[in-house]
Image: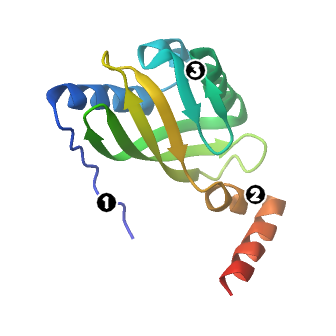
């Protein structure tokens, strides 16, 4: 099975520009670029994913800093977007290798982000949706066996 092609359907040229800028930023994110988060997020932006819920640019930056400490070569690959007015949904693959174990195997988490922009084009709301059990826990050496067993039991 292959992934569908990326699509972008913003309603205005401004929406298109802000979504394209966001995609370029996240697909080229690196530890050296973390200082540029203020050009993407408002100072008091809200961010939530399966492991974090924070408010503020410093807290968001701390999440990305930790990502670079814990993971080897993490990168985002945007696979699609839907934009309307001042918000968008972005589907993505997050690719990385674990520093703690199995540095050889490329891991992929598939997810989506719901983003809301301010009138000046900055992100004020960022909510990531992805299945931590399927995309992460099932791949861990010890926990993975338990998670797969639980999933199998729930489906029987």
Does 99 sit left or right of 25 as displayed? Answer: right
**19 left or right, relative to 152:** left
Residue behind mark 2? 140
Q: Is residue 95 above or below residue 41?
A: below
Counting from the top left corner in percent of width and height, residue 109 is at 55, 51
Label 2: few (<14), some (14–19) or many (≥20) C-alpha neighbours in 10 Å: some
Q: Which of the numbered marks, if any, corresponds to residue 4?
A: 1
Which residue is under mark 3?
31
Q: Which of marks 3 and 1 is in front?
A: 1
**Image coords of residue 104 (percent x, y):** 66, 50
The answer to which quarter of the image holds residue 10 is top left
Q: Which of marks 1 and 2 is nearer the N terminus?
A: 1
Q: Nearer the viewer, residue 66 or 55?
A: 55
Q: Is mark 3 on a helix, strand or loop?
A: helix
Quarter of the picture containing the N terminus is: bottom left
Instruction: Identify the residue shown where x is 73% and y is 51%.
Output: 102
Q: Nearer the viewer, residue 52 or 152?
A: 52
């Amino acid at each position: 099975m292959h992934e569908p092609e990326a699509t972008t359907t913003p309603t205005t040229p401004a929406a298109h520009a802000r979504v394209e800028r966001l995609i370029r930023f996240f697909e080229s994110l690196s530890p050296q670029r973390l200082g540029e988060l203020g050009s993407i997020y408002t100072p008091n932006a809200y961010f939530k994913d399966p492991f974090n819920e924070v408010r503020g640019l410093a807290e968001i930056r701390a999440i990305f800093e930790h990502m670079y400490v814990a993971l080897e070569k993490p990168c985002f690959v945007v696979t699609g977007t839907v934009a309307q007015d001042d918000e968008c949904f972005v589907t993505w693959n997050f690719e990385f290798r674990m520093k703690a174990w199995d540095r050889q195997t490329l891991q992929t988490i598939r997810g989506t982000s719901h983003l809301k922009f301010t009138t000046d084009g900055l992100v004020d709301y960022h909510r990531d949706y992805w299945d931590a059990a399927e995309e992460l826990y099932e791949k861990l050496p010890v926990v993975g066996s338990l998670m797969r067993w639980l999933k199998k039991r729930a489906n029987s």
